[in-house]
Image: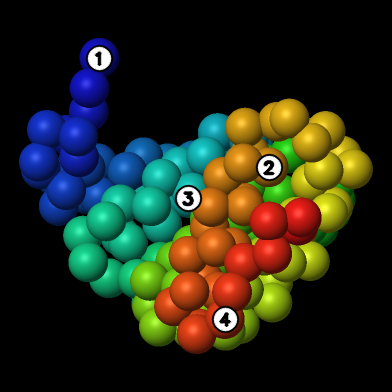
Amino acid sequence: MRHRGELGDVDGALNALNDLLAVQLEDDPDSPDTYATRAGIAEWTGRRGDPQPAVTLLEDLLADRLRVLGPEHPHTLSTRLNLGRWRTAAGDAERAAGELSVLLPEQMEVLGVDHPSVAATRAALARALLDAGGSFDERT
């Protein structure tokens, strides 16, 4: 089933997610479902064309995921990838490239070199490097 954002109603999706988040924060602010909702809000905020607020939301989420899940948890790694993507979109490609270049070997160690998230990080790093005026080393 597709949700509102995928049907073109990004503002409706964000409103629904924010309503859900309000309930989740009262129930358990550190639950996986609460974190997933926060990640969704960041994603749809960015897709709406607001990459800088998406970056801020992801920075906050990353801090909480690091605190609760630790640095090697797949959801923490995923948040770091998404943060790099939205940093690039927000015009901070140089910082994104630096962070993604640190993330990539950590993901390869934790998830394995053939994991789809590793491929996604390679692509995000390539985009960030291109936007920052650098080049992507295929051996990375």
Name the mark on residue 1: 1
User: What is the crowding at mark 1: few (fewer than 14 residues within 10 Å), some, or many (at least 20)?
Assistant: few
Identify the amino acid type marked 1. Met
Q: Mark 2, mark 3: which one is toward the viewer?
A: 2
Tags 2 and 3 touching, CB below 8 Å = no
Query: Contact (CB < 8 A) between labels 2 and 1?
Result: no
Residue tagged 4:
134
Check disc 4: other Cα within 10 Å, few if <14, some if 14-19, many if 20+: some
User: Mark 2 or mark 1: which is in front?
Assistant: 2
Q: Identify the secondary structure beneath mark 4.
A: loop
Counting residues from the start of the chain, the first of labels 2 and 4 encountered is 2
Residue farthest toward the right in the current orientation of the protein = 109
Of 131 and 79, the residue lying toward us: 131
Judged left or right of residue 7, residue 130 is right
Q: Amino acid at mark 3?
A: Arg
Q: Please say if 19 is above or below 127.
A: above
Q: Nearer the viewer, mark 1 or mark 3?
A: 1
